[in-house]
Image (cartoon, rainbow, N blue to C red):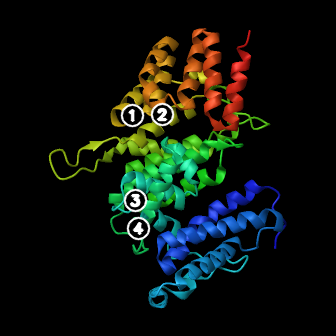
Amino acid sequence: MSRPAGRTTEVEDLLRRHAPQVLGALVRRYGHFDAAEDAVQEALLAAAGTWPSGGVPDNPRGWLIKVASRRLTDALRSEEARRLREERAAALTPRDAFVAPPPGTARAPSEDDTLTLLFLCCHPDLTPPAQIALTLRAVGGLTTAEIARAYFVPEATMAQRVSRAKQRVRGVRFGRPDNWEERLPAVLHTLYLIFNEGYTATSGASLRRAELAGEAIRLTRTVRWLLPEDREVAGLLALMLLTDARHAARTGPHGELVPLDEQDRGLWDKAAIDEGVALVTEALSRGREHRREPGPGRGERTVGPYQVRAAIAAVHDEAPSPEATDWREILGLYDILVALVPGPVERLNRAVAVAMVHGPHAGLAELDTLEPELGATHRLDAVRAHLLERAGDTESARGAYESAARKTLSLPEQRYLQERAARLKP
């Protein structure tokens, strides 16, 4: 055994990294996605309860596979056809596919089980919300509560959605599908949500969950390797790189949140910015083949939303200072994005650009239309507070900051909003 883990969060990050691979190994061997996922969750709980105090095994992935396999085997033993299923699985799969390598030994898998699991979770028999919820749970490692917050729905509703999705993919063959492109929109959206949760955690003491953001980038790189001609895949990867490039400057020495216009741009990752800018520049210059059902307009070349988001991030990252940011270009890009994806978050971000170009009162007018969709979240109050402060209405701004602080479950965001409110007290 290695040295005892010093912090529970370190163990949680380790478990999150290994969970998809462990689940992939079990589903590949036994099938039974729903039962395998339950067994993996039990193994993760066992590890979370013992590793922080007893130490992390030298081969954590092998430990998890062993424990989860025992739990799953116990669950399947009572079924009449258990022996037939196991014999069939063993005959179809190389035996060494299920053997964890010994400590210090690297073994390149024949295919990425995490990516295969990603496409399985985005099976076409599932509705888009179910695809995303299941993938965030099985591949992203998010809890049901975290997924529910991402969708602004009650936790019980999301738990039912995940359970139904697991039942729908029960018995589906575990293997890389031939029709990758049909599942691509759900896959990209899922990766986008995983990255967002990693870059700005919806709850907890840390602003960023590095393992989750890193896994989203890794998986997106893999999808790009599979589909190198798809401009939206390139756009999503560029967006992640350009956004994550700022992470070192987003927090202060005590973990406090630092807003974009106050960040030390010398801390930004220049290599990641250069890669992201090159990706989005190439994607936008070539356009993207827009997939449509057969009919008029099929094959029309257009720009996708991830490319536009990446272009916005590139404008921010390439500006040498906040004052040099080209907000008119950003507003123009948001106009394009909102035409493609007229969601409330996109319109909220556009309202900030409107305020930067036309003044805070113009931005505040844009916010009024978003109250029915975003009124229950902290994001709307936080933006309103910022614009009210810029407009000179400090009393209303303080109230909006305090309201936003009460609504967020992220401790760094909460502290930041409370500090902004405290600054405005008479």
Instruction: Give the vertical position of 359 relative to 121 (above or below).
Output: above
Q: Which residue is mark 4?
A: 169
The disc, 3 or 1, on the residue closer to the chain's N-terminal end is 3
Q: How many marks?
A: 4
Task: Point out the residue furthest to the right here.
Answer: 3
The disc, 1 or 4, on the residue closer to the chain's N-terminal end is 4
Q: Which residue is mark 1?
A: 337
Mark linked to residue 227: 3
Which of the two discs, 3 and 1, sits closer to the camera?
1
The disc, 3 or 4, on the residue closer to the chain's N-terminal end is 4
Instruction: Identify the amino acid type marked 4.
Output: Val
Q: CA distance from mark 4 to mark 2?
A: 37 Å
Q: CA distance from mark 3 to mark 2?
A: 23 Å
Question: For numbered disc 1, what is the local secondary structure?
Answer: helix
Q: CA distance from mark 1 to mark 2?
A: 10 Å
The disc, 3 or 2, on the residue closer to the chain's N-terminal end is 3
**Label 2, residues with CA under 10 Å away: few <14, some 14-19, many ≥20:** many
Residue 95 pos. (x, y %): 54, 87
